[in-house]
């Protein structure tokens, strides 16, 4: 069977880039009156052409039998599949260099559904710290209520902590997931993904080993490819760089078909998929992802350079500035194609000084989130990470002087002018 035009990834022997494939891959206009763009399929259910067809679709959806040669799962009901969801997932798989991808109603829906898929009472999850606030709450406060134990290790500074904690965790029960967020938010601490994979292999029992799940939101999908580095599942909040306009919430998990299967079953039953309109909006965003990301990254480089020279800035945690002798430097070089556009810096002083700067900003918006076209600034210690115990904040270096910036696509000189006037307020104290 020859590949239909909308599934071709090359012109003759010339392979097409993902940025090109985002305009048409996975969508057949002939199925939609020739519409250039995938229409919004605002429907909850789909017509079967015969009772036999309906029966066949359900046999596949519920895994009652293997797919026959060339057979695809037909459209049944929008919680299970729908055209907007399917085209989006085909494109996300291209971006993540994965066999398959599943989309979700939010980043947290993706993370929680994946963790529910692989962990049961008595099991142990190893995870890097700090993780996103919602993930931290899930790991520390919700999963333990179901008898799942969770053990954290500090992301930054080499693999010793991971291996030490792995020994501790294995004594508690079977380790069934290794969950890492790298770069960590907001500190930028890195975890070596290949080392996590080796750890997973060393924990294997027979042919079963704990999956390595990587939250790739901070650099994904263009500046880091976790699956190429040894991860089994690559997770993103599509709300951030992928959605890119701070107007939609979504998530994704990409993996081999085998690792993704239990996650998709769990999604169908929990109902954590995105609605068709969300898929449609995210697909629209994918067309400009490469352009936006390039601009965000180049702006962030300029902003970080400005901050690093400022007398009222105590430190800048921007990955490109990692000194050569820092233990994360080698991991950065190996794993990250760029430093992305979200990073933190400390002002000279504490909370009062950080608040003074945040309140003085004129263009940059004071809000949590990242990855949008507009630049945002926030105060991790009192906002996204406010429920961390103070000793954990100290251990993970989330200080009161820390400000996080998520640099957007505005003119870089304008962003620098805004930060300069806000920081000038500190010098005049
Ligand atoms: C925002 C974020 C999440 C959660 O995503 P939502 O879409 O808000 O549910 C998870 N991980 C990281 C690193 C994030 O920044």
Image: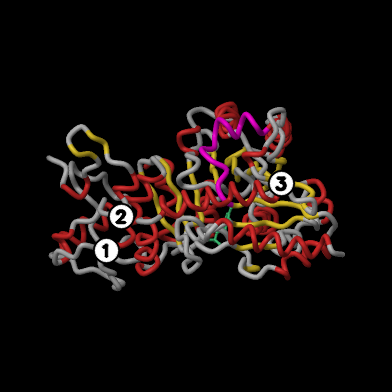
Q: CB of mark 2 within 8 Å of CB of mark 3? A: no
Q: Is residue 59 left or right of residue 251?
A: left
Q: Which one is in front in this view, the residue at disc 3 or the one at disc 1? A: 3
Q: Which mark is residue 308?
A: 3
Q: CA distance from mark 2 to mark 1?
A: 9 Å
Q: Earlier in the sequence, mark 2 or mark 3?
A: 2
Residue 372 falls left or right of residue 321: left
> Regarding mark 3 in the picture, which secondary structure is present there?
helix
- As for residue 118 lying within the magenta part, the answer is no
Q: Quadrant of ligand 1?
A: bottom right
Q: Secondary structure at mark 1?
A: loop
Q: Residues within 10 Å of mark 1 (few under 14, many from 20)?
A: some
Instruction: List the residue tagged with mark 1.
Output: 76
User: In the image, what residue occupies the spot 25% across and 53% down?
Assistant: 24
Q: Give the residue at x 65% y 68%.
A: 366
Q: Quadrant of residue 413?
A: bottom right
Q: At 27% across and 40% down in the image, what residue appears?
A: 16
Q: Residue 129 location, x and y as percent? A: 69, 46
Percent of width and height locating residue 145: 67, 58
Q: From the viewer's perspective, is 343 left or right of 261? A: right
Residue at the farthest right position: 429
Label 2 environment density (alpha carbons within 10 Å; few <14, some 14–19, many ≥20)? many
Q: Earlier in the sequence, mark 3 or mark 1?
A: 1
> Which stretch is magenta?
328-341
Task: Give the residue pinned by disc 2.
Answer: 61
Measuring from the top left, give residue 226's x and y in whole percent: 50, 39
């Amino acid at each position: 069977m020859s590949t239909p035009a909308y599934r071709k990834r090359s012109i003759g022997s010339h392979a097409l880039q993902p940025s090109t494939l985002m305009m048409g891959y996975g969508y057949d206009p002939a199925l939609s009156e020739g519409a250039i763009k995938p229409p919004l399929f605002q429907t909850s259910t789909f017509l079967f052409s015969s009772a036999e067809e309906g029966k066949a679709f359900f046999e596949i959806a519920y895994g009652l039998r293997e797919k026959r040669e060339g057979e695809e799962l037909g459209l049944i009901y929008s919680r299970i599949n729908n055209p907007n969801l399917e085209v989006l997932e085909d494109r996300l798989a291209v971006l993540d260099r994965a066999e398959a991808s599943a989309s979700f109603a939010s980043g947290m829906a993706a993370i929680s559904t994946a963790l529910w898929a692989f962990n049961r009472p008595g099991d142990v999850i190893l995870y890097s710290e700090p993780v996103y606030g919602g993930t931290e709450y899930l790991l520390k406060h919700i999963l333990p209520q179901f008898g799942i134990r969770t053990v954290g290790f500090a992301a930054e500074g080499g693999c010793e902590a991971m291996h030490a904690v792995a020994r501790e965790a294995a004594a508690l029960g079977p380790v069934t997931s290794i969950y890492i967020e790298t770069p960590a938010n907001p500190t930028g601490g890195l975890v070596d993904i290949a080392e996590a994979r080796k750890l997973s292999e060393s924990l294997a029992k027979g042919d079963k080993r704990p999956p390595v799940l990587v939250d790739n939101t901070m650099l994904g999908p263009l500046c880091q490819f976790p699956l190429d580095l040894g991860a089994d599942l690559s997770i993103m909040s599509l709300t951030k760089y992928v959605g890119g306009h701070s107007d939609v919430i979504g998530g994704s998990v990409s993996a081999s078909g085998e690792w993704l299967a239990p996650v998709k079953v769990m999604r169908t039953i929990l109902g954590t998929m995105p609605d068709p309109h969300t898929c449609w909006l995210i697909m629209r965003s994918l067309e400009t992802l490469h352009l936006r990301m390039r601009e965000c990254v180049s702006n962030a480089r300029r902003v970080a350079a400005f901050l690093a020279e400022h007398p009222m800035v105590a430190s800048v945690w921007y990955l490109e500035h990692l000194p050569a002798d820092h233990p994360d430097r080698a991991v950065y070089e190996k794993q990250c194609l760029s430093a992305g556009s979200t990073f933190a810096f400390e002002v000279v002083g504490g909370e009062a000084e950080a608040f003074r700067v945040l309140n003085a900003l004129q263009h940059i918006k004071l809000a949590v989130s990242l990855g949008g076209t507009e630049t945002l600034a926030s105060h991790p210690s009192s906002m996204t990470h406010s429920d961390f115990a103070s000793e954990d904040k100290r251990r993970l270096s989330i200080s009161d002087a820390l400000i996080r910036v998520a640099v957007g696509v505005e003119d870089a000189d304008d962003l620098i002018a805004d930060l300069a006037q806000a920081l000038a307020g500190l010098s005049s104290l």
